[in-house]
Amino acid sequence: MKLSHPDHAAPADAAARQAVTPVVCYPPETLPRPDLAALRAAREGWQKTAEVLVPARDAACFTVPAGHFFRITSVEGPQVGDLNLWNAADLSERFYSGKTRALHGTHLSTGDRMWSAFPHLRPLATISDDSLDWYGFDAFGGSVHDVIGTRCDPYTHNLLKGGQYHHCCHSNLTRALADARGLSLREAERHVHDVLNVFMCTGFLRETGQYFMKASPVRPGDYLEFFAEVDLLGALSACPGGDCSAEHSSDAAACYPLLVEVFAPQNPPQRWQPPAANGYDGSHGR
């Protein structure tokens, strides 16, 4: 939130400066587009191979082979989730929410991709279907599935409220990864990263630019579906804020589990190939 200084009066050309037309930083026209028709066709006759029920106010890990699909589904009540993704063979290649936001915008939906961190910068997963596509952007500027919020965490909780709160999404993801990979909490925490806020409805207040949340429109049966471009390790936290209608981290909010299901297609999508690592040579001008 910007605070104006009493000595900083607007210049005579203030209106002209503000009226400059914006330019999209990363035009997406040259990005390779996913073949959604091929992805949808590959779902015909698929077989469910695994499922994980993520407990309310906790997190769990899951694996998805390259070329398979996974769905996150609301099963009992309105609930948002915080999603981390890694290359299952190399935890240093992880979801890069900032670059994904720069390429696709503040909120993701069908056809958008989850890009990995440098030096890889390639798609980890593609969103193949979204039952909340209909929501779009509301009158407040809110939408679902954001890549702007970081995840609720014990450090910010301590900074703003004091005390020790352990069932926030950051701690949930840390515990889940530690258990899945046999790591210490300190080792696991280094790999936990900014998330895709699945089902969360968020935006920015126009007056102050502050990040806001509102009750998620998700209902039991709604889902967000992904196609795994590489072998994936995922971790999903069922946020202690529930539908995030009132509090971000809370022991009072109504919270529900989330279901993760993994599906194997009978055949890979037509013309699909696992993405190569980014082609930059890494010389950095030397």
Image: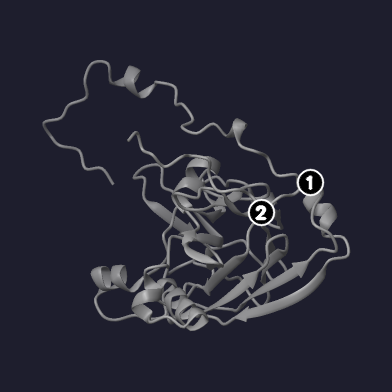
Q: Nearer the viewer, residue 253 or 113?
A: 113
Q: Specify the amino acid type for callout 1.
A: Arg
Determine which of the numbered discs, if any, sits on residue 207 in the image: none
The residue that appears at 52% across and 61% down in the rendered structure is 197
Give the CA separation, mark 2 to mark 1: 17 Å
Residue 270 seen: yes
8 vs 258: above or below: above
The residue that appears at 60% across and 79% down in the rendered structure is 257
Where is residue 219 drawn, in percent x and y? Answer: 67, 67
Query: Going by the picture, which residue comes out furthest to the left?
Result: 7
Q: Is residue 199 left or right of residue 24?
A: right
Query: Going by the picture, which residue comes out furthest to the right?
Result: 45
The quarter holding residue 251 reads bottom left
Location of mark 2 (residue):
127
The residue that appears at 78% across and 67% down in the rendered structure is 264
Give the secondary structure at mark 1.
loop
Give the secondary structure at mark 2.
strand
30 vs 20: above or below: below
The quarter holding residue 80 reads bottom right
Residue 57 seen: no
Q: Specify the amino acid type for callout 2.
A: Ile
Q: Nearer the viewer, residue 136 or 245?
A: 136
Lower sequence index among marks 2 and 1: 2
Dot 1, how many residues are within 10 Å of its Cα: few (below 14), some (14-19), or many (20+)? few
The residue that appears at 71% across and 50% down in the rendered structure is 273
161 vs 109: above or below: below
Image quadrant holding the C terminus, namely top left
Q: Nearer the viewer, residue 61 or 242?
A: 61
Q: How many marks?
A: 2
Location of mark 1 (residue):
271
Where is residue 156 drawn, in percent x and y? Answer: 30, 67
